[in-house]
Amino acid sequence: MTERRLKHFGWGREGEGLTAEEEGAALDRYRRLFNVESFDEVAPPSLSDIELRPPRLAPPAALAPCCSIDPYDRAAHTYGKSFSDYARGLAGRYDNAPDVVAYPHNETEVAAVLDWAGGAQAAVTPFGGGSSVVGGVEPRLDGTAYKASITLDLRHLNRVLEIDRTSRAARVEAGVFGPALEAQLKPHALTLRHFPQSFEYSTLGGWIATRSGGHFATLYTHIDDLVENLRVVTPRGLLETRRLPGSGAGPSPDRLFIGSEGILGVITQAWMRLQDRPRFRAGGAIRFADFFTAARAVRAIAQAGLYPANCRILDPQEALNTGAADGTAAILVLAFESADHPVEAWMNRALECSADHGGSPESTGVTDRHREGAAGLWRNAFIRMPYAREGLVRRAIIADTFETAITWERFEAFHDTVKAATEMAIRDATGRPGQVTCRFTHVYPDGPAPYFTFHALGRHGDLLAQWRAIKSAASDALIGVGGTITHHHAVGRDHRPWYDKEAPDLFAAALRAAKHALDPQGLLNPGVLLDP
Ligand SMILES: Cc1cc2nc3c(=O)[nH]c(=O)nc-3n(C[C@H](O)[C@H](O)[C@H](O)COP(=O)(O)OP(=O)(O)OC[C@H]3O[C@@H](n4cnc5c(N)ncnc54)[C@H](O)[C@@H]3O)c2cc1C
């Protein structure tokens, strides 16, 4: 059976989405939150109604078979999946659609596309799954001398090429999507065990380029720690790093490209560190009187060296929104797992740390309950959430998230400042109160990664400006009180003003010099991470 194509507007494949029941329940909740009877609903333009400027360049004959100027391909590569992307897609604004989408099958074709772009004065956007939420894949040419844009979609580089069972690693092509990667590793009883929420529709190359964070809370969950080596096609040629378990030989070449967001080269392959598939699990949900009490318990767990696989606190409102609790308690979703040994002892100790702070487990015992009760309800909401956003923007509901990290000693004041600034910005931008909730996605011995979600009722026609005002106020607040502009969503173009404040000036100068050495014409992703 052939797979349905990916939506040009929305999450997943054509025909996929929330059920009527799921959407009805979400809208009921928003009706109560905003105290309205109904929503002003606008439909996105159909593909045939989208106006695209005629392509400004044509591929050379040798590349024509792997290139497309089809309106579907151009529209589906105009945006990522941020709120601003959805708002502009809804308004039919496709001014920055790429002129050509190239689908190379190998490194030779990747290099040929870069050569062609260099000669044709065209900018190039590397494209994995297009799940960027920071304007990372939009081919914007403002501020550049480029007259055309080419998007380089790596989906055909999708194979696991080699497995080293002894070292437990695999050589993998960068365009592989999460499920296809795990399906190729499964027969070997191995897993990359990297599961961002966007897992289904994002790629290995995208994860590496953005330093993505998997949904496990501690230890090996960041892609950074899973990369053993890289192959990168740059405009200056191919570069391959040495495959090693570790190295102290100067600054790490891998680390230069991990998080480079497509501005230094196109990642085509990587040897990735794998893990045996987990067999032992223990987990469940724990109720706390409030968010900060739960946070103190989580700090104790993190500093005890227990390293849970899951350790998410939902504040009472977020627990209510996801159906995990009734709004009177914060919920800690906690789980341990191992491929090697039973984990009940770790879970027991974590329950003791929780009890020290008044936490009460939802059920007795330490068996695996991570798919039951509050933990299971939270898990389902987490998996279905990406499909909700396209339906919300149609109804002018601004629902978005931002994430950061901060050390423990600043966390409580940080949380209150950021939450209050975001709530105030919602009132100022939309004229009515909205809602701001928080959870932890990752925890470290020295601090958590708080993840905020906000909900506001906007107005069609003003959505982009309203979203931008809220997003800017939240970003100003979290940078102002010492956080990072992103813990795992990357910088792209949307986070640039705050990244520029966060990154030391001399570091930015060094990054510019690296860019100049590898991409002297500045073909790759102009405006991402650095000025064009
Ligand atoms: C619903 C949803 C949930 C999400 N959940 C998470 C999460 O849990 N954790 C997380 O970390 N992020 C999350 N994200 C953000 C996003 O999924 C990540 O940034 C992801 O790593 C992007 O992968 P991608 O393949 O879609 O890359 P793309 O969006 O296609 O590209 C992202 C950036 O990387 C560059 N790039 C892509 N491929 C390559 C390559 N091969 N070589 C060089 N540059 C390249 C692009 O030019 C762009 O700048 C989420 C996004 C959505 C929409």
Image (spheres, grey):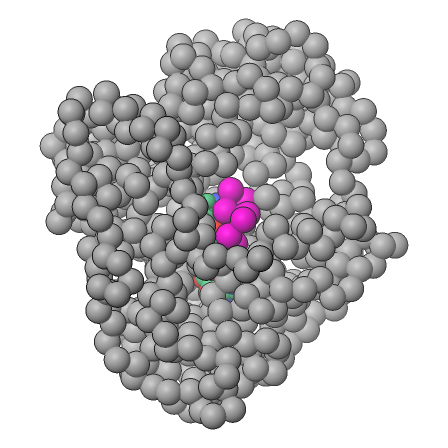
Direction from residue 317 to residue 313 in the image, left or right: right
Q: Quadrant of the N terminus?
A: bottom right
Question: Does residue 352 lie above or below 311 as drawn?
Answer: above
Q: Residue furthest right?
A: 166
Report the front residue among 334 and 514: 334
Does the magenta segment cover residue 198? yes
Please state the total of marks drawn on the protein image: 0
Asked if 403 appears above or below 45 in the picture, the reply is: above
The x and y percentages for residue 452 are 38, 34
Query: What residue sits 50% from the left and 26% below the top?
Result: 378
Please state the horizontal and vertical placement of residue 394, each as a whole percent of the image: 24, 43
The segment highlighted magenta reads 196-202
**The one of 103 and 337 positioned closer to us in this rendering:** 103
Question: Compared to 414, does 352 lie above or below?
Answer: above
Question: For residue 483, which quarter of the picture?
Answer: top left
Can I make out residue 218 in this image?
yes
Whether residue 502 is visible here, answered yes or no, is no
Residue drawn at the location 74% of the way across and 48% of the way down: 186
| Viewer-nearest residue: 456 or 494 | 456
The quadrant of the image that shows the C terminus is bottom left
Residue at 78% x, 64% y: name it: 162
Q: Is residue 270 magenta?
A: no
Q: Examine the rendered structure and indicate whether residue 97 appears above or below residue 472.
A: below
Residue 148 horizontal/vertical position (percent): 32, 81
Say which residue appears at 26% left-offset and 65% top-offset. Answer: 48
Q: Quadrant of residue 272?
A: bottom right
